[in-house]
Every structure is written in C-alpha cells, then in structure tokens.
Image (tube, rainbow, N blue to C red):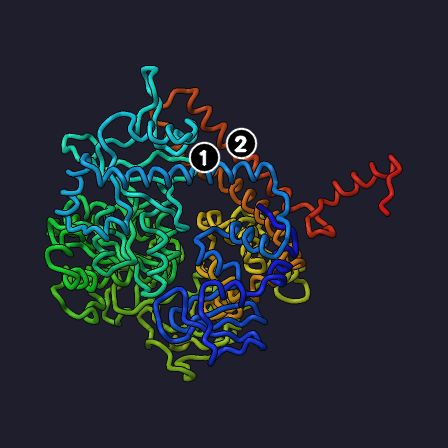
C-alpha cells in the first residue's frame, strides 16, 4: 500500500513517543525530565534493572545503551506488538484520530492474497505442533529426543508432526472454513488424479517450518519417518510465498546473530542448523534441500562477507563443496569470498557437536580453508603427476578455472597462490626464489588483462620463453591505468631490477606517465595508455593542432555513452539505490526486490547490502551508517550521477508515493533487460531433446524478453520532463497530449 506524501510525518507529529512507550515501561523519575521530553526507563527489549533505555520526545527517537535497540514510534509498536509496518501505522493512526488513506485495489488484492496464504501457513504450523504432542507423534518425539532436542528446543524451532493419512490437515483446515484454493495455493495439499478429494502434501513426517527474513511462515520441510520412503526430506512446492532457490532456513535469526558476531555458517540441512544454533552458533543457515544457488549465494554475502561452508565430512559433502566452487568463482568480488570447513570423515555438524561439544566444532571452523586451497585439492587429490603430460593437464585445468574469475585483481592473486602450491608439490619445498630460470611458467595469466608478466630473467637464462620467477608485473598498464612508474619486473636480459623510489635507474620517462622507467639506458618498448604515446618520448602522429576533435569529458564519463545493456542496468541500479536511500520508508515494501537485485559492481552491492541491513531497522540513520561503512564519497558519487540527479527521488526526498512509483518502474525495467539472458540460458539448456514446438516457444520467450528490454532502453533514451508531482513525462507524449487539450478547449486554471 502506498501512503500519501506527508502522512507519516503528520502521524509522527500527532503521536507522542513518550505516551506510546509509557504503556510498556516504568519511567525512572530521578533521571527523567518530562518537561524537556527526556525520559529514561529499564529497556523493554531485554532484562535489566538499570534505566538505560532513553526516549527523546522532541526528536521522536528511542535508544537503549544496553541492547542498542533504536527507532521511532512506528518501530516501537512493531517490536512490542509483533505487527508489521502497515499494522503499526494503523494502530497509531487510530490513536491519533487520523483516517487511513484508500488503497490501490489491485495491489491490495495481491497483498491480501499473500497475507491470507501466510495465515493459512500459520494455522498449519499450529496443527503440526499439536500433532507432535499426540499419541500419533510418539515415534517422532522419540526420534527427536535421540537427536538431542529438548522440549524448549522443539518449542523454539516450532517442530511438528504430520500424521499418516491422506486428508488430516485438509480436513482440519476445511473444518475451520479455510477455502480450498488457499490450502492448495499454500502448497499444503495436492489435487487427486483419481477425481477424489485433494490429499495432504506431507504425511508421516517431522515438520520444520521455513520462515522468511521477516519471520513469516512461507513453507515446510518434512523428514520422513518411514525409512522406505522415496524422499528422506521433502520441501513445500513453490508458491506465491515460497521460492526455494531464493530462501534460506533460519534466515532472519541468523542475519540478526551475524550482525553481532560477524560470522555466518552454512550447513547442509535443518538438523545441522538447529544443532549449531543450540550449541551457540546462532548465525547458521541452510539451503532448502538443493545445492546452493546463485541467488542464495548473493543472499549469504549480504549477511556476511565471508560465510563459512560447514559441510558433511563424506563424499557427498565434498562434492557439494566442489560444485559450489564453480558457482562462486565468476561471482567473486574484492572482500566477498567463501571459506570451507569440512567435518571429520563420516560426521556432519549435528553429529560432531552432540558427540564432542561446541569446542570440537569451533576447532574445525578455525581450520576453515580459503576457496583457492579447496580448488587446488580438487584438481590434485588422488592424482599422480609423474609425466610432463599430466602436469600440463593440471596446468590447463587450473587455467580454465581461473578464467572464470571476472575481477582481474582476484584472478591475479589466485594465480600467485596456485603458483606457490604448484611449486611446493613439484619442487619439494625449495624456496620459490630459486625458481628463476628453471623453465616453469604455469601461465595463469592467460585470462584477458590478468596483468601477469613472466618475470625478471637472469642474464644466463637461455630465454626459451618458459621462464618463471618470484616477481610479477601488477599489470596496471594492461588494465588501462598507468600508476606513474614502471616497477621494472618485466625486463629482459638487460634489466637492472625495480627502480628505487625517486632514483631512476635509467633516463626519465618524458612520455607523460608521471614517473621513471627502471630500464637501463632506455625506455619500455610498449605504449603508455595514459600518455597516448610511446615511452621513448615519441608522440602519436595525430597529437597537435591538427588533432581531431575530442569528445567532451561529460560525454566520455556518461554511463550511457557506450549504450551497452550493462551501462543501462547500472543506471537503473543507481536510481533505485538513490531512491531507497533518500526515502527509506519504502525499503520494507521493496525488500524482496532489493534482495534479488544482482548489482553490477561492488560499490552498488555494498550500498544495497547496507540499505537492507539498516533501512528497515534504523531508517533515520541510514545515510550515517552508509557513510561510516562505505565512506562519505559513496553517497556523493551516487547522487552526482546525472541520471540520478534528475530523478524524482532527489527532487522530492521522503515522498513515499513518488519513490514507490520510481522503484516499481525501475525494477520492472531492470527485470525486462535481464530477462533476455535468462530466457536464452534456459533455451540453451532445453535445446537437447526438445521438440520443434518447444524450441520455438523457448525462442519466442527470449524474443519477448528482448523486446521488453529494447522498449525499456528506448524509453530511457527518450527525453523527459519532470511533472509537478515528480513523475517523469515523455516530451513527445506531453506535447501530443497538450495539443489534444487545446483542440477540446481545455484550460488549466
């Protein structure tokens, strides 16, 4: 639901935070000053005796110096009454005597449908919980007791039981008047193929409720009690509430715990997560019955920069870790990686913590290895490299994997680490410095612009082009950037080595690269991209008064100058981020869209993660949190972009309606522009074995996605004006509409 501009400000003005909080606390009369609206009390969010909970009625905010809870009146009502944002608005509006605005009928119907499904899911949770305590659930209770789960743990995790029988849950929900379409829509029942009544999805299973980041029950996971059952674990089908590839078990509590500890563990199943959390590792999550997907990996990185993958110590667990490497390599960014903690052979985290306690698990986590080590282990473990051909095969396999890494810097560091590991394997621990001239160049710089140079070659090196040494060229020139000096590591037989700071070994580099060359008696032979000429001082022939006109600086720096789809997508991301930062009240409504937005560039990804972490809990401090984590320049750079500067979000900051319209439009465009790649990928996967009609349909879907993207791109390139309400108006449409109004004699007065 969209609230009209100024509604929330008016609501906060009419409501006294002291009165709202005063219903839940006892004020400390010695510390409080009611005349100034400066009130103190024991915190209602954690048990304490001292008055560390502060309310500033004039500013409209509260803060606890003990548990660090903070927010405004709306946030306080949400936390203490356990209601959503709109419900909190309704409660305070009723107290203030304000009438709630009318809702958009279509959006309201969709929201109401999801709310109804969520309520049906809550009824199912209660039904399964009740069944666990009956005689039918005796076997399930015994099993859970053997797994070490106490009564409080069962309550905390809301574990239940689905009894045998085809229509137990169906009959219970229908008896309470729940419509059939809601039961089916929630994935709790399936239609009968024999024309009978629908039957329960879960039967004779221990039930684990799956909740989203907001705490809503969206699905179930069921463990079979019958060992002969075909599926040991069964998840709910995908519904309007549940997308398996975009959900994590224990997502919300783990995100909160990770914010305090800075650590995040990823286990394989429900019982592993429960055992870890009960053992003190509360920041633990699990994928839902499948290998980790790209969306789930991005969700993990939004919670923590370096999650630890704690997988079972068996062949299946190791295979899952190896598959995850291939998924993660193309997605790696600076500061975003994975570590792997493999449990002892034959044990999972649940087994280890029950058998040996928390300390044993912590010891395994302390030994977690970086991903490059596991990649090396995968390619070398159990293999013999006793011939040049086998060694070459290893080199090729590693080069192929490194090519998947998009970030040149990360790719370079992976190459360095793998060179070290290769040297240790084949040279028995000899220092790498002895490698010069030994003829061992693994060639991990085969990826474009990796920035590697074979290194300094001693004068007695025969120079067969297979040299290898400890030095490397960081490759700034090949990346399009000249750092201002040449380290000199890429010299041939006449190199004196790197240049000392400020003391050139050769002649000064007058080409404009702002530094000196370490070459003896000469200059580097290549071009300097920064200077536009050769390093021997020779200028390019078109330099001078006859040079062709150069594009303006603003044109070159425009994100849309190249016209690529990636540039357009980055523009849309920038507008989205600027909108939610200037109007954080819309973050809760578009939280799912932000979660699913795969950002182009680490700067956008960082801003999105900070918005998700602080935009809902502390909207008033969002910009401060961003400045503290990303630097003040992050917001300055974002808001300085031309397409952001002219967007409605900066013209009318805090306007919820305009922000909602902007986000709905930009998310739709972003989805359309990226739909083509997804459709083509699915078409490619489905080509083998498909009938001609299926191929045609797939390609049709791809074409439709492409058309949407093109229309969206053309719309972005059109000229717009900004209306009085902040909406963007296409000038051609505006002029045509204005002409029509003139013909019918309409005058705006």
Q: Is residue 723 visible?
A: yes
Q: Residue furthest bottom?
A: 503
- Identify the element where label 1 is drawn: helix
The tag earlier along the polypeptide, 2 or 1, is 1
Q: Name the residue under label 2.
A: 704
Which of the pair 432/722 is nearer the observer?
722
Task: Find out whether the residues at labels 2 and 1 contact each other: C-beta distance under 8 Å.
Answer: yes
Q: Which residue is drawn at 42% across and 25% down?
A: 695
Q: Is residue 111 left or right of residue 194?
A: right
- Identify the element where label 2 is drawn: helix
Q: Is residue 204 left or right of residue 54?
A: left
Q: Can residue 607 be seen in this view?
A: no
Q: How many marks?
A: 2
Alpha carbon separation for disc pair 2 and 1: 9 Å
- Count neighbours of disc 2 (C-alpha within 10 A) and say few if under 14, some if 14 to 19, many if 20 or more: some
- Count neighbours of disc 1 (C-alpha within 10 A) and say few if under 14, some if 14 to 19, many if 20 or more: many
Place of residue 18 in the rendered image (x, y in percent of width and height, measured from the top left): 53, 68
Place of residue 716 in the rendered image (x, y in percent of width and height, measured from the top left): 63, 46
Q: Which residue is drawn at 60% across and 37% down?
A: 105
Place of residue 644 in the rendered image (x, y in percent of width and height, measured from the top left): 61, 57
Q: Is residue 145 left or right of residue 692?
A: left
Q: Name the residue under label 1.
A: 679
Which of the pair 687/427 is nearer the observer?
687
Asked if 672 appears above or below 578 in the picture, the reply is: above
């Amino acid at each position: 639901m969209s609230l009209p501009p100024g509604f929330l400000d008016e609501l906060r003005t009419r409501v006294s935070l002291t009165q709202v909080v005063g219903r839940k606390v006892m004020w400390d009369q010695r510390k409080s000053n009611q005349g100034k609206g400066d009130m103190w009390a024991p915190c209602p969010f954690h048990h304490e005796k001292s008055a560390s909970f502060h309310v500033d009625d004039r500013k409209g905010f509260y803060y606890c110096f003990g548990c660090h809870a903070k927010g405004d009146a709306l946030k306080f009502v949400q936390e203490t009454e356990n209601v959503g944002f709109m419900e909190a608005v309704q409660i305070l509006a009723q107290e203030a005597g304000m009438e709630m605005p009318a809702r958009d009928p279509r959006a309201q119907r969709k929201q109401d449908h999801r709310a109804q499904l969520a309520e049906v899911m809550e009824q199912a949770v209660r039904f399964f919980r009740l069944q666990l305590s009956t005689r039918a659930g005796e076997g399930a209770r015994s099993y859970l007791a053997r797994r070490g789960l106490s009564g409080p743990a069962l309550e905390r995790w809301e574990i239940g039981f689905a009894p045998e029988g085809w229509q137990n849950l169906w009959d219970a929900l229908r008896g309470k008047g729940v419509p059939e379409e809601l039961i089916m829509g929630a994935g709790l029942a399936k239609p009968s193929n024999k024309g009978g009544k629908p039957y329960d999805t879960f039967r004779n299973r221990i039930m684990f409720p799956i909740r989203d980041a907001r705490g809503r029950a969206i699905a179930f996971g069921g463990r079979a009690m019958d060992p002969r059952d075909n599926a040991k674990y069964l998840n709910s089908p995908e519904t309007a509430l549940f997308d398996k590839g975009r959900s994590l078990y224990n997502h919300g509590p783990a995100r909160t715990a990770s914010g305090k500890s800075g650590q995040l563990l990823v286990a394989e199943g429900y019982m592993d997560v429960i055992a870890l959390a009960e053992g003190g590792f509360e920041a633990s999550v699990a994928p839902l019955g499948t290998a980790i997907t790209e969306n789930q990996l991005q969700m993990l990185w939004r919670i923590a920069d370096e999650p630890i993958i704690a997988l079972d110590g068996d062949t299946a667990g190791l295979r899952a870790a190896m598959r995850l490497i291939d998924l993660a390599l193309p997605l790696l960014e600076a500061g975003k990686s994975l570590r792997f903690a493999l449990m002892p052979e034959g044990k999972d985290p649940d087994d280890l913590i029950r058998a040996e306690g928390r300390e044993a698990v912590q010891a395994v986590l302390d030994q977690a290895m970086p991903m490059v080590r596991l990649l090396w282990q995968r390619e070398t473990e159990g293999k013999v490299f006793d011939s040049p051909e086998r060694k070459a095969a290893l080199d090729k396999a590693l080069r192929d994997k490194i090519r998947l890494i998009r970030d040149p810097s990360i790719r370079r560091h992976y190459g360095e680490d793998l060179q070290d590991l290769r040297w240790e394997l084949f040279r028995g621990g000899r220092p790498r410095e002895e490698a010069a001239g030994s003829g061992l160049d693994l060639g991990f710089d085969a990826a474009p612009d990796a920035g590697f140079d074979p290194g300094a070659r001693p004068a007695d090196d025969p120079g067969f082009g297979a040299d290898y040494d400890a030095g490397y060229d960081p490759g700034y020139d090949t990346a399009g950037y000249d750092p201002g000096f040449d380290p000199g590591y890429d010299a041939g037989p006449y190199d004196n080595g790197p240049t000392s700071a400020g003391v050139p070994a050769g002649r000064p580099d007058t080409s404009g690269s702002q530094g000196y060359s370490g070459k003896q008696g000469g200059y580097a032979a290549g071009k300097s991209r920064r200077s536009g000429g050769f390093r021997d001082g020779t200028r390019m022939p078109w330099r001078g008064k006859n040079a062709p006109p150069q594009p303006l600086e603003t044109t070159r720096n425009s994100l849309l100058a190249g016209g690529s789809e990636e540039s357009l997508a980055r523009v849309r991301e920038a507008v989205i981020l600027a909108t939610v930062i200037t109007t954080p009240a819309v973050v809760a409504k578009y939280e799912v869209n932000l979660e699913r937005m795969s950002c182009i560039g680490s700067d956008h990804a960082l801003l999105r993660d900070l918005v998700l972490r602080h935009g809902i809990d502390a909207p008033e401090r969002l910009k401060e949190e961003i400045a503290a984590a990303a630097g003040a320049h992050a917001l300055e750079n974002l808001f300085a972009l031309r397409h952001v500067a002219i967007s409605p979000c900066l013209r009318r900051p805090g306007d919820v309606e305009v922000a909602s319209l902007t986000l709905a439009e930009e998310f739709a465009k972003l989805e359309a522009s990226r739909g083509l790649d997804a459709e083509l990928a699915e078409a490619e996967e489905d080509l083998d074995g498909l009938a001609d009609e299926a191929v045609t349909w797939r390609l049709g879907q791809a074409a439709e996605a492409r058309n949407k993207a093109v229309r969206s791109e053309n719309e972005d390139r059109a000229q717009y004006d900004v209306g009085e309400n902040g909406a963007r108006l296409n000038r051609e449409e505006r002029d045509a509409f204005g002409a029509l109004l003139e013909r019918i004699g309409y005058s705006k007065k």
